[in-house]
Amino acid sequence: MVKTVNIDCAALRDREAAHAYLAGALSLPEWYGGNLDALYDCLTELGPCRIVLSGAAALRRAGGYGAKILAVLEDAARDDPDLVLIGAEPAAVRFASEQDAAALLAIYAQYIDTSITFETALPSEEAFAERIRDISRVYPCLMLELAGRPIGYAYAHRVRERAAYDWVAELSIYLDRDHVGHGLGTRLYSLLIDLLRLQGLKTAMGCVTLPNDKSEALHKGLGFHLVGISYSSGYKNGAWHDVAWLEKPLAPYDVPPAPLLPIGQADPSAVAALLENFNKA
């Protein structure tokens, strides 16, 4: 069984306090000597373990002894395949392109056998590239990377074809399962919403197959509210599934509304600032 340990990097700035904190958090052995060499040895002998860091970027910027501890954590994770370090490198986001189809499809494949998506067969790489191209004509299709490796994506798409629905879109997000539950989904979804506001979108919709506590919590934490449940609306994996619809107003419903801008026509400086702020966090 893989153990997960959460580490607050703010507790690593002072030398003595840092080693005491790590000894308790990681249940290090008695022979742990409270120094960097001993820390490395202990880390590589932990066995299967996921260490989730919060505030690593700030610790790195501050430098000092805390940054040295962070370097040891990173060295141990590189040398020991049983040790997974999450949050050491800041996540970066960019717009996805057709060339990213294989990487995003690999993430989507983790969910194809679940009821989270009602799609029953994994699309081809060519078909997935076409989806990215079609979405990107109007809406953001965002790709999340960690140390250069794709770990998630989020996008918006139309809910209905009639012109009256131009100002409402449905949002979707998929994260690599190793990176679920660490706040990255909330950050990526929030960025997507902010970009949609720049386009002039009025209402964001979320569609959640029930039960899905994590997705419901994500939406409700960002201010979505339940507008209805479609009972037994999808059949997959030998069962009928209910679907919850949640919505979040994004902007005043002025009359008449300005036309929705394709993402490529939104204010480029504002778009760049949103992506830059995400990548700096």
Image (cartoon, rainbow, N blue to C red):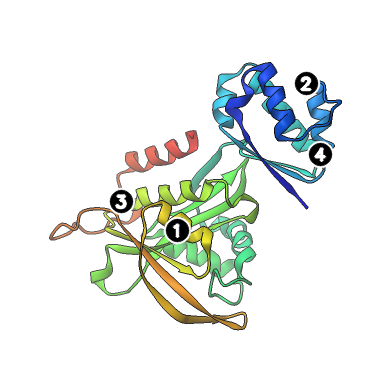
Q: Which residue is mark 4?
A: 46
Q: Nearer the viewer, mark 2 or mark 1?
A: 2
Which residue is at the front of the view, 272 or 242? 242
> Marks 4/1: CA distance?
38 Å
Q: Which residue is mark 1?
A: 155
- Assess whether mark 2 and mark 4 are in contact (beta carbons under 8 angstroms): no
Specify which label sits upstream in the sequence, 4 or 2.
2
Badge 3: how crowded within 10 Å, few (<14), some, or many (20+)?
A: some
Q: Which residue is mark 3?
A: 197
Give percent across and percent down for residue 251. Answer: 24, 53
Kindly state the secondary structure of the residue where label 4 is placed.
loop
Looking at the rendering, which quadrant does residue 46 occupy? top right
Which residue is at the front of the view, 89 or 182? 182
Give percent across and percent down for residue 281. Answer: 49, 35
- Assess whether mark 4 and mark 3 are in contact (beta carbons under 8 angstroms): no
Q: Image point 46% across, 81% down: which residue?
A: 233
Give percent across and percent down for residue 221. Answer: 42, 52
Disc 4 marks a residue whose amino acid type is Leu
